[in-house]
Image (cartoon, rainbow, N blue to C red):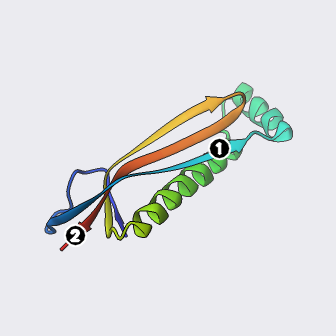
């Protein structure tokens, strides 16, 4: 499945629109990981633990969106947007786009 932030796929024609598809992932923060992340932030380094969790959440949201597009018979998702939010110490990543059929 082609997933792109652009409104079209170069060299391919959109023959049908299947609708908007979304994917969400909400991950809870680990207390020990938060402690080490705080120490890393104080020392001025990067928080590898948070970067890893963010990557997992993004991959989960995109995979869920692709599954929903496939269930609609789509061959691509165009106009993809990723949003990140922190809700009550939990990380939420949501993805949305338009499921389409390409020629």
Indicate left or right for 38 with 21 as reference.
right
Looking at this view, is 30 or 73 the one in front? Answer: 73
Q: Is residue 60 above or below residue 96?
A: below
The picture quadrant where one finds residue 45 is top right
Task: Give the vertical position of 34 relative to 74 (above or below).
Answer: above
What element does badge 1 sit on?
strand
Report whether 31 appears left or right of 66.
Answer: right
Q: Residue furthest right?
A: 32
* Left or right: residue 56 compared with residue 2: right
Looking at the picture, how far across and down is residue 87, in whole percent?
65, 29
Quarter of the image where the N terminus is located:
bottom left
Task: Name which residue lies at 83% across and 33% down.
Answer: 35
Q: Residue at x 76, y 29 (%)?
A: 38
Name the residue at 22% across, 70% down: 102
Q: Which residue is mark 1?
A: 26
Residue tagged by mark 2?
102
Residue 33: quadrant of the picture: top right
Work out how far the residue at label 2 is from the one at label 1, CA to CA, in angstroms. 31 Å
**Residue 44: quadrant of the picture:** top right
- At 73% from the left edge and 34% from the top edge, which residue is drawn? 40
Residue 25, compared with residue 88, is above or below; it is: below
Looking at the image, residue 10 lies above or below residue 98? below
In this view, the residue in front, 103 or 49, is: 103
Q: Secondary structure at mark 2?
A: strand
Return the disc, 2 or 1, that comes first in the chain's sequence.
1
Mark carried by residue 79: none
Image position, residue 95 (x, y; %):
46, 47
Mark 2 surroundings within 10 Å by alpha-carbon count, few (fewer than 14), some (14 through 19), many (20 or more): some
Where's residue 10, x and y in %?
A: 16, 63
Return the x and y of residue 30 as percentages of the image width and height. Answer: 81, 41
Residue 45 in the figure: left or right of residue 59: right
Callouts 2 and 1 close, C-beta under 8 Å: no
């Amino acid at each position: 499945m082609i997933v792109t932030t652009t409104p079209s796929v170069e060299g391919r024609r959109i023959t049908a629109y299947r609708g908007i598809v979304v994917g969400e992932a909400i991950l809870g923060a680990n207390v020990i990981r938060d402690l080490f992340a705080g120490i890393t932030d104080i020392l001025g380094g990067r928080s590898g633990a948070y970067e890893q969790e963010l990557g997992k959440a993004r991959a989960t949201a995109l995979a869920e969106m692709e599954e929903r597009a496939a269930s609609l018979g789509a061959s691509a998702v165009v106009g993809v947007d990723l949003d990140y939010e922190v809700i009550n110490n939990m990380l939420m990543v949501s993805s949305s786009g338009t499921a389409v059929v390409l020629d």
